Amino acid sequence: MNVRTLCLSILYDGEATGYEIRRLCVEGECAYFVDASFGSIYPALARLETEGLVTSRTEQQDGKPAKKVYSITDTGREAFVAELGEPLGEDVFRSPFLLFARFAHILPSELVESRIREQADKIAESIKTIESAANQGQLTPADKWVVDYGRTVLGVAEQYMRSHMHELITMARAEPKKAAAE
């Protein structure tokens, strides 16, 4: 899955500007699929337009610069379905917290305890965000399946952190004792 396919997926459901596509990729429903920056979205949209998979039109705005609105073509819809039929790449999971946890044994236990609690709280907030988004509108059965999958994966991660945090804290080194004044 790449930025090109992600752009087609967003346009499959309706028109969008490059900015709206980026917003959906950062904070919207597509944030969990593929990492996409403005530097990758706009070139992808330009290639898609050159290939006839999307079209664009310019809309004037009062007091603002004109915006370019993209729409998927019938050929683009067919290409999107074909791309979904291609073999999927590996899921990518990156976690700065896991790097931190990997070296918990060289860190003060108070810091490790603080960070693991922060991480568990962040996961709980992510679950609430997913649930809130799910309650905002009508979900298709496929959308519900994806939301439930995300909620379940995050729920297991939070449960693991909370029930096993003591193990990581125990691995951390105790704060060095200050030397007694002579």
Image (cartoon, rainbow, N blue to C red):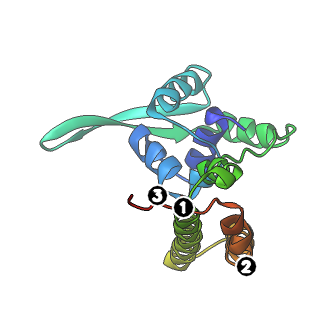
Instruction: Give the image location of residue 24, x and y in percent.
Output: 49, 51
Residue receiving disc 3: 179
Point 55% across, 68% down: residue: 126
- Earlier along the polypeptide chain: callout 2 or callout 1? 2
Instruction: Give the image location of residue 134, x and y in percent.
Output: 57, 75
Instruction: Give the image location of residue 174, x and y in percent.
Output: 60, 63
Cβ–Cβ below 8 Å for labels 2 and 3?
A: no
Q: Quadrant of the N terminus?
A: top right
| Viewer-side residue, 110 vs 91 | 110
Local secondary structure at mark 2 = helix
Residue receiving disc 2: 163
Q: Tell me: 154 left or right of 56.
A: right
Residue receiving disc 1: 175
Q: Tell me: 95 left or right of 178.
A: right
Of circles 3 and 1, the one toward us is: 3
Q: Amino acid at mark 1?
A: Glu
Cβ–Cβ below 8 Å for labels 2 and 1?
A: no
Q: Is residue 148 visible?
A: no
Work out whether 43 lies above or below 147. above
Local secondary structure at mark 1 = loop
